[in-house]
Image (cartoon, rainbow, N blue to C red):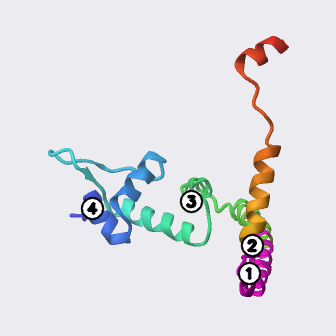
Amino acid sequence: MEPRYTIGRLAREVGVPASTVRYYERSRLLRPDGRTEGNYRIYGPEALERLRFIRAAQAIGLTLEDITTLLDFRNGRTAPCREVQTLLEERLSELKKRLGQLRHVQAILRSSLRRCRRTERRGRCEVLDTLKVVASASTTRAPRRASSRESSNRT
């Protein structure tokens, strides 16, 4: 007889909260095999393997949409290596862009920290002062939203 898992046991086997398993169900990544007489979800070994696959794919940076695609490929009859390569290339490209953005943020934070340390002795924090000026400039320059009556008068 093959093992059966409740949602709690399945979640523990993989090291995720039961809420994660429920989320994957809502996302249609995972399905219970059925329900017990008490209406508890029940899963088999295939669900356990699928859940492990989902977590492994997430661990390498794939989105749930990517994982859905991979699961569709995996369930097919041929090995779609070219499609998987394309998907991985897209993720790498996005990661490269995000890393560039993070490096920019890192440079700004380092510069701000240097300025903060330099001006600390004067009893002022240049970073706080700068952020205050930027924040007040943004609120004064924010475009005024048109009221519904003004919008209807324009048409």
Label 2 near label 1: C-beta < 8 Å? yes
Q: In which quarter of the image is residue 122?
A: bottom right
Question: Looking at the image, which residue is at 38% across and 70% down?
Answer: 14
Q: What residue type is labelled 2?
A: Val
Magenta part of the protein: which range?
101-127
* In the rendered image, the vertical position of residue 112 relative to residue 67, given as above or below: below
Which residue was labeled with disc 4?
Answer: 8
Among numbered discs 3 and 2, the one appearing first in the sequence = 3
Q: What's the distance in space between the residues labelled 3 and 1, CA to CA?
A: 53 Å
Residue 89 seen:
no
Front of the two marks 3 and 1:
1
Label 2 near label 3: C-beta < 8 Å? no
Q: In which quarter of the image is residue 8?
A: bottom left
Which residue was labeled with disc 1?
Answer: 116
Q: Is residue 110 magenta?
A: yes
Question: Looking at the image, which residue is at 22% across and 49% down?
Answer: 40
Majority SS type along the magenta span: helix
Secondary structure found at label 1? helix
Label 2 near label 4: C-beta < 8 Å? no
User: Percent position (x, y) of residue 102?
Assistant: 74, 72
Question: Looking at the image, which residue is at 74% across and 73% down?
Answer: 127
* In the rendered image, the vertical position of residue 10 relative to residue 26, given as above or below: below
Front of the two marks 3 and 2:
2
Front of the two marks 4 and 2:
2
